[in-house]
Image (cartoon, rainbow, N blue to C red):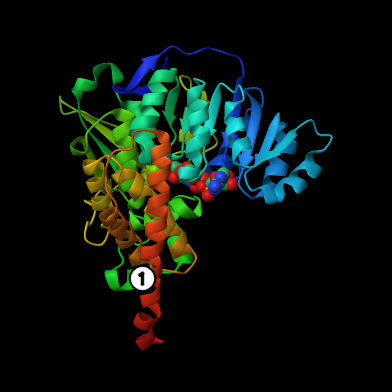
C-alpha cells in the first residue's frame, strides 16, 4: 500500500512491488538532495537513477552524475550548460539546461521522484511528476503552500502519490491511522524554536544572516534555515499538514521542543498520543519516503534517550515569532493568501540574506504584501503563477521602502 493525498487526506492506494526503484532527484545538489544521493549511493542495488537536477552548483551536479550515471542531468541556470555538457561528454549521461529541461526531467519515467527544489520554483516540475502518476517524495513544502488545493486535486485526478519528506509530516504519516481518520483528534507539530528561541526582540533586530542560518539541530539550506529562525517554517508546515492530512487549522497544534527528538505527534479520541522519535538527521524521513511501504537502512545516529535524559516542550511565543500567526491567518483566509504569503516570504528571506533588510523586517514585509493584494482564490495553476508574480513584485517594493529607512535607523549606533 502506498498513500496518496486527495480530498480525504492521505488514503491508501495500490503500489507496485519491485526489485529496484527508478528515481529522479529534483534539486539533487541541495541539503535534502545530497542526503538523498547519500542514501542512494549506500544502497546501489535498490535504485536506478533516471535524472538529477540543480540550479547552479554545476560542479556538484557533475560529480553526482559521474558517480550515479543517471540518464539525464539538468542544470536550471543555462549559463552553466557548456560546462555540464563538456564534463559529461562520453559518459552516457545526457546534459540539458533551462526551466523546460527541469520539467522534462520530472516527466521522464521514474516511478519515484524526490522533489527537493527550494521555493515555488519546484512547483512546475513537481506537477509534471504528479501528472504522470508518479510517487512523489515531497520535501518542497512551498509548492503545497502556494498551490495546495490545485496540487492535491491533480494528485487525486492523476492517481499520483505524495509521501511527506519534511520530518514532522513524515512523523505524523508514520503514526497516522488513515483507516480511522475520525479517531484523530489533533496533530501536534514540533518545532525546534530555531537559533533565536531565547533571544529578546532588541537583539533579534541586529542578527546577521550568518547567525540566522546556523541552526542549532539541523543542517539545512539557507532559505529553510532563515524560515526556522523566524518560525515561518512552522507556519508553512501547518499549511503543508493541512493539505497532506486534510485537517483544519484548528486541529493542528505547534509545540516548541528544542531537542528535536520527538518529530511530531498524533492525538486520538481515546486519549492516546502517538509520536515518532529519532535523532535530527533528514536521512531518516528521506529513507522512509524512498522505500515506503518498506523501510530501508539509514546511517543516521541512533537515538540514545538515556544520554539525552530530558525532553522539554513549550508553547511558541507568538509575540517574538509572529510568523506562525500570519501563516495561520493566511490559511484561514484561504484563496490566494497562502500563495501570497509564500511568495512574499521568499522575497523577504532573499532580501535579508542579501543584507537589504533586517531580520525583524521579514514578517512585516509578508504581512504588508498580504494586506495589499486581494485574496480571491486562483482557479488555475496559471492564476497561481500570476498571483505569485504579483506578490513578489509588491514584496520587493515593500522591502525597498523598508530598506531605504534602514540607514537612518542604524545611524545613532554607527
Ligand atoms: P537547498 O537550498 O540546500 O537546495 C535547494 C536545491 O534546489 C538545490 O539543488 C538547488 O540547486 C535547487 N534550486 C534552487 N533554486 C532553483 C530554481 N530556481 N530552479 C531549479 N532548481 C533550484 O534547500 P534544502 O534545504 O535542501 O531544501 C529543499 C526543500 O526541502 C525546501 O522546500 C525545504 O523547505 C524542504 N526541506 C528541507 C529540509 C532540510 O533539512 N534541508 C527539511 C525539511 C524540508
Ligand atoms: Mg520540518
Give left or right: position of 6 versus 25.
Answer: left
State the image coordinates of residue 192 (x, y, percent, origin top left).
35, 50
Where residue 162 sits, quadrant-wise, is top left
Q: How many marks?
A: 1
Helix, strand or loop at label 1? It is helix
Q: Nearer the viewer, residue 202 or 395?
A: 395
Q: Residue at x 31, y 35 (%)?
A: 241
State the image coordinates of residue 65 (x, y, percent, origin top left).
71, 37
394 over 70 or under it: above or below: below
Outermost residue to the left: 270
Mark 1, other Cα within 10 Å: few <14 / some 14–19 / many ≥20: some
Q: Residue at x 47, y 69 (%)?
A: 355
Q: Nearer the viewer, residue 316 or 409?
A: 409
Give left or right: position of 362 versus 137.
Answer: left
Q: Is residue 259 visible?
A: no
Q: Is residue 271 visible?
A: yes
State the image coordinates of residue 405 (x, y, percent, origin top left).
36, 76
216 over 32 or under it: above or below: below
State the image coordinates of residue 354 (x, y, percent, origin top left).
50, 65
Give left or right: position of 281 versus 188.
Answer: right
Q: Nearer the viewer, residue 400 or 319?
A: 400
User: Label 1, on which residue?
Assistant: 402
Quadrant location, the N terminus: top left
Amino acid at each position: 500500500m502506498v498513500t496518496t493525498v486527495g480530498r480525504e487526506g492521505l488514503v491508501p492506494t495500490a503500489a507496485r512491488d519491485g526489485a529496484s526503484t527508478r528515481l529522479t532527484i529534483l534539486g539533487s545538489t541541495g541539503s535534502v538532495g545530497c542526503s538523498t544521493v547519500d542514501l542512494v549511493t549506500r544502497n546501489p542495488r535498490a535504485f536506478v537513477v533516471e535524472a538529477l537536477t540543480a540550479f547552479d552548483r554545476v560542479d556538484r551536479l557533475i560529480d553526482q552524475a559521474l558517480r550515479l550515471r543517471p540518464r539525464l542531468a539538468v542544470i536550471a541556470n543555462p549559463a552553466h550548460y557548456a560546462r555540464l555538457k563538456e564534463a559529461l561528454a562520453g559518459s552516457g549521461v545526457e546534459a540539458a539546461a533551462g526551466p523546460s529541461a527541469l520539467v522534462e526531467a520530472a516527466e521522464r519515467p521514474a516511478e519515484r521522484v524526490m522533489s527537493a527544489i527550494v521555493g515555488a520554483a519546484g512547483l512546475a516540475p513537481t506537477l509534471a511528476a504528479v501528472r504522470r502518476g508518479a510517487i512523489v517524495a515531497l520535501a518542497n513544502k512551498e509548492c503545497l503552500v502556494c498551490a495546495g488545493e490545485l496540487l492535491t486535486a491533480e494528485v487525486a485526478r492523476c492517481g499520483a502519490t505524495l509521501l511527506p519528506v519534511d520530518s514532522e509530516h513524515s512523523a505524523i504519516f508514520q503514526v497516522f491511522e488513515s483507516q480511522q481518520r475520525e479517531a484523530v483528534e489533533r496533530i501536534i507539530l514540533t518545532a525546534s524554536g530555531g537559533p533565536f528561541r531565547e533571544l529578546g526582540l532588541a537583539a533579534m533586530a541586529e542578527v546577521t544572516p550568518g547567525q540566522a542560518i546556523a541552526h542549532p539541530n539541523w543542517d539545512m539550506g539557507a532559505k529553510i534555515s532563515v524560515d526556522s529562525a523566524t518560525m515561518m517554517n512552522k507556519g508553512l508546515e501547518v499549511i503543508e499538514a493541512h493539505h497532506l492530512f486534510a485537517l483544519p487549522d484548528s486541529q493542528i497544534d505547534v509545540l516548541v521542543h528544542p531537542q528535536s527528538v520527538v518529530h511530531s505527534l498524533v492525538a486520538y479520541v481515546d486519549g492516546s498520543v502517538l509520536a515518532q522519535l529519532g535523532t535530527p538527521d533528514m536521512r531518516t524521513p528521506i529513507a522512509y519516503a524512498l522505500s515506503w511501504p518498506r523501510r530501508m537502512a539509514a546511517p543516521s545516529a541512533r537515538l540514545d534517550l538515556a544520554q539525552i535524559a530530558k525532553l522539554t516542550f513549550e508553547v511558541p511565543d507568538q509575540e517574538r515569532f509572529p510568523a506562525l500567526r500570519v501563516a495561520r491567518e493566511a490559511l484561514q483566509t484561504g484563496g490566494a493568501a497562502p500563495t501570497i504569503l509564500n511568495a512574499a516570504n521568499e522575497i523577504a528571506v532573499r532580501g535579508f540574506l542579501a543584507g537589504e533588510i533586517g531580520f525583524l523586517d521579514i514578517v512585516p514585509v509578508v504581512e504588508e504584501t498580504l494586506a495589499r493584494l486581494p485574496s480571491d482564490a486562483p482557479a488555475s495553476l496559471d492564476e497561481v503563477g500570476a498571483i505569485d508574480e504579483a506578490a513578489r513584485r509588491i514584496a520587493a517594493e515593500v522591502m525597498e521602502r523598508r530598506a531605504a529607512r534602514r540607514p537612518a535607523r542604524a545611524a545613532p549606533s554607527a
